[in-house]
């Protein structure tokens, strides 16, 4: 591979912290998780964080904790990873998709109100590629209709828009530390919340609804645990937290590096026929998680294949969820229902993008892409 699709940013200090944890007594949920949660809340300026095993788990727990269940509807976007809508199914509720803005791919707030029914309990916006949705409008709609908001902020740790950060307007927000995310523990996630009651519930439901976790039971006067709510096994481990704690100190530096690389990509691709880019709104600071561009749908798969054949790692974000076979066959979704999401799904190409990518590698990627486009 000439240019890998992704390189994580785990550094010597993270490996050292991991080593220290591995030499300690508690490698499951304990002190490191607590340190991570406090640091994460401080970074996002939200009151509460609960460390979990993935963003999928975070979304599921958040929906459950906010009272979403069987027979309820949750309004979301088809332009996301399947985890977003699957988490609604995990909660026993029904995903109701609304179409996206054609130029950003984010949920179009103007489509939400007509999708609200008596069964609607929550809105689940996804901050696609790292740009926050129009959270001010979405929040106003939620308030007016007494709906909860769970943000899918898997791409959006560093995002800001109109002075608001990820997780600040939602009742809860889900973050991912999957292998290709801006900070990573291989797999991992976090859910943030504003209400103490929701926070306390999340802390229990991430571990089977148990009243005390193992590290809280150990070393004190012996006490049995009880289970007073139904829960899952989604607790973040100290191993994951040890990897994440120091990466948090590099979030802003790494964003600055990606901002510079983003500019280089745009400069190299400026004026090239046959490509366009998702828009970034005025007043938005994108987390710049994915560098995605759009090509002619009839050329897209060939572009992906030819880039990969030339040794350049690629991906497609995303094929719309409503067109996945399971969703078509079991939930009645059909082609044509969400034309903007379908258009994006047919033209999207994601290129390598991470802090240690070099300008020379970007030139290799863009040079190859230009040659491929010129060959059609
Ligand atoms: C938008 C979005 N939401 C949710 C997820 C799920 O994250 P995780 O793999 O941590 O469950 C992803 C993962 O890539 C994602 O891109």
Image: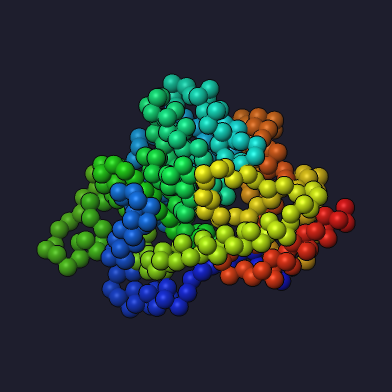
Can residue 229 be seen from the camera position used here? no
**Location of residue 22 by image quarter:** bottom left
Residue displayed at 26% across by 58% down: 213
Front-most of residues 328 and 3 = 3
**Location of residue 247 by image quarter:** bottom left
Can residue 257 be seen from the camera position used here? yes
- The colour scheme used to paint the residues is rainbow
Residue displayed at 31% across by 50% down: 48
Vertical placement of residue 195 versus 355, above or below: above
Seen from this angle, which residue lies furthest right? 375
Q: How many marks?
A: 0
Q: Residue 286: x percent and y percent? A: 53, 51
Residue displayed at 65% across by 39% down: 103
Front-most of residues 270 and 92 = 270
Q: Residue 281: x percent and y percent? A: 57, 42
Front-most of residues 82 and 225 = 82
Q: Say which quadrant the N terminus sits in.
A: bottom right
Seen from this angle, which residue lies furthest left? 221
Q: Residue 110: x percent and y percent? A: 55, 28
Residue displayed at 42% across by 44% down: 164
**Location of residue 259 by image quarter:** bottom right
Q: Residue 133: x percent and y percent? A: 51, 40
On screen, residue 319 versus residue 253, left or right, reads right
């Amino acid at each position: 591979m000439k240019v890998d699709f992704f390189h994580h940013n785990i550094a010597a200090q993270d490996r050292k912290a991991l080593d220290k944890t591995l030499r300690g007594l508690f490698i499951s949920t304990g002190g490191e998780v607590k340190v991570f949660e406090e640091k994460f809340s401080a970074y996002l300026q939200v009151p509460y964080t609960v460390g979990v095993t993935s963003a999928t788990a975070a979304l599921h727990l958040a929906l459950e904790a906010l009272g979403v269940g069987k027979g309820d509807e949750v309004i979301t976007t088809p332009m996301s990873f399947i985890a977003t809508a699957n988490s609604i199914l995990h909660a026993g509720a029904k995903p109701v998709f609304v179409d996206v803005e054609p130029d950003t791919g984010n949920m179009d707030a103007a489509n939400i109100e007509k999708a609200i029914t008596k069964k609607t309990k929550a809105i689940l916006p996804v901050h696609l590629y790292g740009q926050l949705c129009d959270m001010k409008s979405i929040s106003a709609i939620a308030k007016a209709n007494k709906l909860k908001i769970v943000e899918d902020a898997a791409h959006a740790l560093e995002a800001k828009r109109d002075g608001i950060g990820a997780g600040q307007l939602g009742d809860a927000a889900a973050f991912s530390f999957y292998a290709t995310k801006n900070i990573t523990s291989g797999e991992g996630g976090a859910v943030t919340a504003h209400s103490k009651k929701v926070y306390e519930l999340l802390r229990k439901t991430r571990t089977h609804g148990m009243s005390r976790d193992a590290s809280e039971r150990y070393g004190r006067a012996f006490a049995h645990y009880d289970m007073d709510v139904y829960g899952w096994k989604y607790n973040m481990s100290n191993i994951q937290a040890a990897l994440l704690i120091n990466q948090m100190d590099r979030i802003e530096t790494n964003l600055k590096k990606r901002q510079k690389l983003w500019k280089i990509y745009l400069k190299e691709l400026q004026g090239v026929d046959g490509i366009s880019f998702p828009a970034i709104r005025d007043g938005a600071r994108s987390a710049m998680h994915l560098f995605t561009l759009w090509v002619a749908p009839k050329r897209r798969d060939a572009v992906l294949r030819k880039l990969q054949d030339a040794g350049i790692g690629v991906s497609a974000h995303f094929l719309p969820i409503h067109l996945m076979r399971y969703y078509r066959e079991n939930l009645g979704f059909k082609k044509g229902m969400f034309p903007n999401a379908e258009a994006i799904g047919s033209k999207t190409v994601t290129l390598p993008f991470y802090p240690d990518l070099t300008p020379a590698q970007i030139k290799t990627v863009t040079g190859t892409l230009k040659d491929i486009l010129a060959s059609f």
